Amino acid sequence: MLTSLSLIACTATITDGTVGGTGGTGGNGGGVAGSGGGGGTQRMDGPVAPRFQCANGDSAIELPLRRLSRLQYQNTITALVKQFAPTSGSAILTAVAPIIANLPTDAHVGGPTAKRGGYTRLDQALQQQHIDVTYQLATALGAQFTQSTQRLSEIFGACATDASTTNDAQCLDNFVRNFGGRAKRHALGADDVTFYEQPIGTGSKVDPAALADVVALILSSPGMFFFEEHGQDGTFTGRVPLDAYELAARLSYNFWNAPPDDALWQAATAGDLLTPAGYQAQVDRVVAAPPADTGMTEFFAQWLRLDALPQMNALNSNPQYAAFVGSTVPNASTTGAMVNDVLSSVLYQAHHGGGVSELLTSSGSFSSDPLLAGIYAAPASDGTTPSAVPSPARAGLLTRAAMLADGLPVTRPIMKGMFIRTALMCDTVPPPPPGACMTPPPPLPAVSTTREKTEALTEQAGTVCAGCHKNVINPLGYITENFDALGRERSQESVYDPSGALWGAKVIHTDSVLQVVPGDMRPVKDAVEATQRIDVSRKVHSCFAEQYFRYVTARLDDPQQDGCPLSSLESAAMANQPLAEVQKRAATLTEFKTRSFQ
Amino acid sequence: MTSQPGVVLSRRFFLRGVGGATLALPLLPSLLTSREAAAQAANPNNRCFVALLTVHGGVWAQNMYPADASLTTSQLYATAGFNVRSGALVPTLNNGTTSVSPVLSAPSTVLTPALVNKMNVLRGLDIPYQFSHHDGRGALGNIVLNDGTTSTLPANPQRRSIDQVMAWSPNFYTSTQGIRERSVHLHTISYPSYGYSNPTVGASSGIQGIGRTANDSMQLFNDLFPMPSTTPTPTRPLLVDLVLQDYQRLRNGSKRMSAADKQRLDDYMQRIYELQRRVSTTTAPACNNITQPAMSNSSISGAPDANGSDPKAPYDGSTQSPALQTQYYQLYNDVLAAALHCGATRVVVMIADSLMSDFGTVPAGLWHDNVAHQCDGATGQQNMTQAQSAFFSGVMVDLAQKLDAADEGNGSTTLDRSLVMWTQEYGNLIHVPYAIPVVTFGSASGGLKTGNYCDYRNLNKLKNPNATGESKNQAPGLTWHQMLGTCLQAVGVQRSEYQESNHNGYGVRVADPASDWPQATWDAAGDMLPFLS
């Protein structure tokens, strides 16, 4: 499948305020064709041209029989157990927790711009362990549901344990319709009810062992593991509108990673979701509801690769690291605090009408963690209201601790630069060329800054490394070198030997030529200017739109065939519409509400 | 239903190798009755394959291989059109350490001369284009899946990894009776194994990564050695049969579905068939009486959290611990040795992917910059050599000796019917695809000759003959495709099961620059590697 490539030429030329999207050279670093924008002449002091155009109408691409992610499946099990076993649910979930832990992990799947990142939703591979573990879990839950008279009565109703046998058949029917419907996220037909009652055979309708098999059979059904969608009844040309239950599931799983709640279920049952007003009302409610925070934070955690942030305390007893951190000794909570600071910032903007620009440029601390608050020199936050950060050098997202810290005694400008270039701006950088290890760096004084070492290692004239590292990767990492590897502000870099002895310190420099837009050779002095330059370009906004499209559709995009939905999201994002509005727009895309069966 | 996966009831013993101890499998031979042992010995179709992988590499030739002087034989490999060399592996014993090279060293109590005689060291096998990083993804056959680029990729270049060819080969698994897992996969982040989405359909179903079989050694044990059921078979229909029916009624019903939707259902049903096969098959008797191990390697690595994170590195939170790292894999080895011996599986792929640095003392975060990319410096090379050697000694040799201690009852050992191979991500320089080292143990029931050091480089094509460093050794040789095909043939897979239309080796033909791997090397790609057959 094609993806929206924004391949960066690793050498660029100054063209008096504009750069032509004419492609790079094949010289040092293996530069390749492309530009940072949609081709053609590109402005450098304003937004780049949109990358996506709506030319081909509705997308014809459809992910076939999408499965639930691990998180979605787990949330579904939890919701079902709590709904049908409100009293004993916690004990049941505790009993099956070891099996749930064995559910296969979803891999992060990304496109060419996210070789090390991506979204777990996009892992649609079917593993043998999926059926092995879900089958084992289903049978275990069946056994748990029928473990005692009390549970039978609680879950299946008093009719399952009373002395009467005349109500047993109706008792079973009711359970299968209710439990089966919620498990499969769709009202069951009579044929379904008959099928799922098969384990009963000719025996007692309330035989615990048989009921356990009924539960296990329902939980092993296709509609439980997959998003089973058939569309509305009738004849349609092209994409088929989803029915009300299917819409309810799309909304809840996309925004909540969980099954429909009672209100959505009722809206589906009543048919309200099939009216424009009824659908919009549910979209507004779902996006604003507290569970939507889980979808928002999952997306941003994976886009910003926060789940890959190392443990800051892992090297506490390493002498060099211990000397580096000094009295700011990280603890087991530090990494989580850094992640939460970013995600709380995301949620704050989502709840308060902020867009990508506000996310990029807002520097308030959301940390209640004393160590992180100390790094920011800010009062502790309650996690929902930002505390003012006094330093003007804190430029926003790029200077939040999670974007700077690496758990090491030194910063990693290359990694920081690659992250901004590829993950945040959706540019693609060519892979390392052959012989990347063939040219040893020239000797440097022991007291050299990380920037100087990086320049010596990767920016030597005439080497295969210099093209990309000097022009498009490293500068984006240098602009935050006034923050150390724990996110503390600094004006000079202290250099320690492996034993922790201080070798010396040297003044750092952050001035760089970023080429946010290739060929833009205007320098920036620090992260504040860099953030402004990046914000103005709207490249992160455009990238957000593409990434969110992937998250919503659980697939990589095709810039041609998906041009219309991508363009719709991109226009909203580049106009800096609130994050919540971009979410809602995703839910109103034709591709969200309909399905192709071609 | 005769058994429930994952449940432990009664298992009589389990071998102990915890903590790098050198205990063998003292009780395993007693598991087999004389009739079972005789049957096993007479069965030519029970070969095993184990692939062990480490990422990065860039170990200099002088540290990775025996001395050049040991290459005592040079002969023209006529098909490829150049001379190749070989010699017997001759270990040196010094201060309790047996060495074939600095990396290929281990305590003499473990790496005995007899074990060295069951070993091969192969040099001069190339992934024939620049691939940047494959992180293990390309090692076993899907060589185009990497971060690199080439202008010569053909259409539909992805291929199954060879472990999946074996797992679904009727010539490898002539019977799946007693087989709990066709293949076992142990990794954290990288996916080294790729198979058809639906193996019974084939290439048209697409290629996908194969997820890990278990998150830790205890889960693996419970999967491979399920508790024999003590409950009577219920009179109701087997649940798994009803589950399958549920999928079939959707697949074949009248509800609106696309052809691709139905293909996905078919793919999933194939996995239900596999589950159905297992729940209705009788576990091999030798697998029924194995005692649960005393500890899981999750206790030293940290199990995945509630959100299913990847297993964490075996790391004590304060200092690097190569000993813990080794123990982590040895606990896997204990389970794998028993499973291979008793026939619970016959294919294993295990990769030390994100955890490679923990075999050394340089912290993980510094590994890439300070070791992997400082490989041309003495300190970086020393660290890389030390770490790769720790893997060889602590993991590969540990598994080999455990398999070699498992008596098959016919004078041979489980190792003798196995092919255990280890390879790294790169050749002798980082990001260089020439001469990616391969080390093997076992002859796969005579499928391979052993005891050899082979050098398949074409010395007429040295890339930098006047260089002074490691780059002076760089020269293209034979293809990775030929190595993979050799593994397949050694374990009994027929060449007709995998050969390509434009060469007879395994995997898509890619050569960049083409002059490094001319037509003659592709003509040779279907052969067993010289000196080994």
Image (cartoon, rainbow, N blue to C red):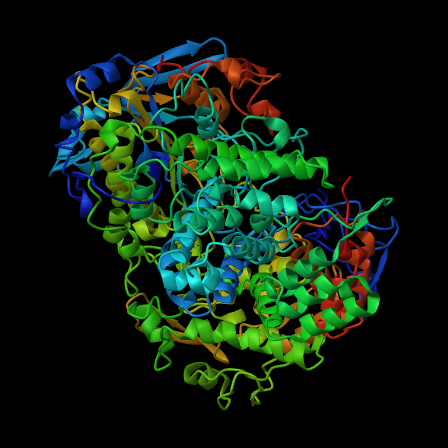
Q: Quadrant of residue A278?
A: bottom right
Q: Position of residue A116 (x, y in %)?
A: 55, 53
Q: Is residue A285 left or right of residue A560?
A: left
Q: Position of residue A264 (x, y in %)?
A: 67, 66
The answer to whether residue A118 is visible is no
Q: Position of residue B303 (x, y in %)?
A: 35, 56
Q: Residue at x 45, y 81 (%)?
A: A372
- Please determine whether, in this image, residue B409 is positioned above or below residue A63: above
Numbered-mark total: 0
State which quarter of the image contains the N terminus of chain A.
Answer: top right
Q: Position of residue B309 (x, y in %)?
A: 44, 57
- Please determine whether, in this image, residue A297 is positioned above or below residue A558: below
Q: Residue at x 50, y 30 (%)?
A: B141
- Please determine whether, in this image, residue B299 is positioned above or below residue A578: above
Between residue A471 and residue B50, name the one nearer to us. B50
Between residue A56 and residue A474, name the one nearer to us. A56
Q: Is residue A380 left or right of residue B29?
A: right
State which quarter of the image contains the C terminus of chain A.
Answer: top right
Q: Residue at x 37, y 35 (%)?
A: B1
The answer to whether residue A567 is visible is yes
- Please determine whether, in this image, residue A406 is positioned above or below residue A346: above
Q: Is residue A252 left or right of residue A225?
A: right
Between residue B264 and residue A304, name the one nearer to us. B264
